[in-house]
Amino acid sequence: MLDKQNLFISGECGYHTFRIPSLLVTREGTVLAFCEARKSGAGDAGEIDVALRRSLDNGDTWEPIQIIAGDGTSTIGNPCPVQDQETGTIWLLLCRNAGDGHEKDILAGKAMREVLLIKSDDDGVTWTDPKDITADVKRPEWTWYATGPCHAVQLQSGRLIVPCNHAVLNPETSSSGPYTAHVIYSDDHGAKWQIGGIVGLNTNECALAELPDGSVYINMRSYHGQNRRASAWSLDGGLTWSEITIDEALIEPVCQGSVIEDGRGGILFSNPASVKRSNMTVKASMDGGRSWTMEKVLHEGPAAYSDLAIAKDGTVFCLYECGEERPYERITMACFSRN
């Protein structure tokens, strides 16, 4: 059975568009649904805040939208949450730039892109003011930077590891080289963060899952011109990565996707499984992302970004952008139980 609820609808609460969904089920069982609340338009720059809705009953009902991060007319977005299972602290990684700092200006080295961190110690009810961690996780020659956008993970070792991507400035051309995925991590419960392994070129928005053998799988948006996702694996907690593999089974329109451990020794993957932004689909793998089977088509029409989470009872949550005429009309939560 597939249940759906529209959690964020364009035009509500004084915001033109809601985009960039991210999900977390806390150790208490609370479901947290994050996204960007774009004030005046659907574009990636401008006045953008971070919105949250909470569910205390496994997604049946939802608290009203609350804005948990904003900075006047600036852009704050790319929400990427992770909970430390030992301390209970929820960390939310974010990015910030000036409202008129468009991506092309950042790539040209003409505008700044910063990395922020906020946290909650009460299951997402309240959040701290942002802390700027840019100097710890971004190299001076990097221009573009993005966290997630989707959830981060905590490894069995306790390491908090966050999927990110960047681009490097070429001073001679005043432009940046290809997008490149990387990770950042903390081994001290979020007190300090540092740069981990850098994956191959021509990849950016990415998602992580720890496999039963302790290796880490990364699934990435790909710019290799084949309309397929890119993958790599790490045997040392994200400090180094294998060569990139182009996954022929995962068709994509060059868009974001999500992966998550499924609690059964496998992983789930969601994305618009098409050469255009449509056909939001969840697939399953029992061999660490090396082969896939069809799990569920959630929305055949226009669709784009998504994120996955697993409830304590095994229910699968997928929070995704969709619509009837364009992919960004609403952000919908779908939930289903697996056989």
Image: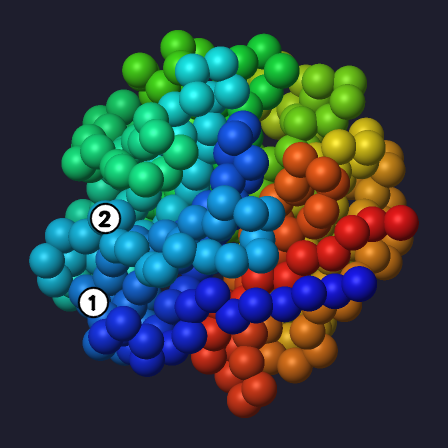
Number of callouts = 2
258 to 234, vertically: above or below: below
**Residue 154 visible (yes or no):** yes
What residue did someone put label 1 on?
A: 46
Mark earlier in primary sequence (2, 1): 1
The type of residue carrying mark 1 is Gly
82 to 41, vertically: above or below: above
152 to 58, vertically: above or below: above
The type of residue carrying mark 2 is Ala
Mark 2 neighbour density, 10 Å: few (under 14) some (14–19) many (20 or more):
many
Mark 1 neighbour density, 10 Å: few (under 14) some (14–19) many (20 or more):
many
In the picture, measured across the screen, residue 274 lies left or right of residue 327, that is right
274 to 124, vertically: above or below: below
In the picture, measured across the screen, residue 216 lies left or right of residue 173, that is right
What sort of colour scheme is used for the picture? rainbow
What residue did someone put label 2 on?
A: 69
Give how far across and how far down residue 178 sits, in percent: 45, 51
In the picture, measured across the screen, residue 313 lies left or right of residue 63, that is right
* Distance of label 2 from label 1 (alpha carbons): 15 Å
**Residue 222 visible (yes or no):** no
Question: Judging from the image, what secondary structure is the residue with disc 1 in?
Answer: loop
In the picture, the disc for residue 278 is none
Kindly give the residue lying farthest to the bottom in the view shown.
325
Which of labels 2 and 1 is toward the front?
A: 2
Q: Which residue is drawn at 29% across and 55% down?
A: 66
Question: Judging from the image, what secondary structure is the residue with disc 2 in?
Answer: strand
Give how far across and how far down residue 240 sits, in percent: 58, 21
Q: Residue at x 38, y 68 (%)?
A: 18
Q: Which residue is drawn at 54% across and 24% down?
A: 154
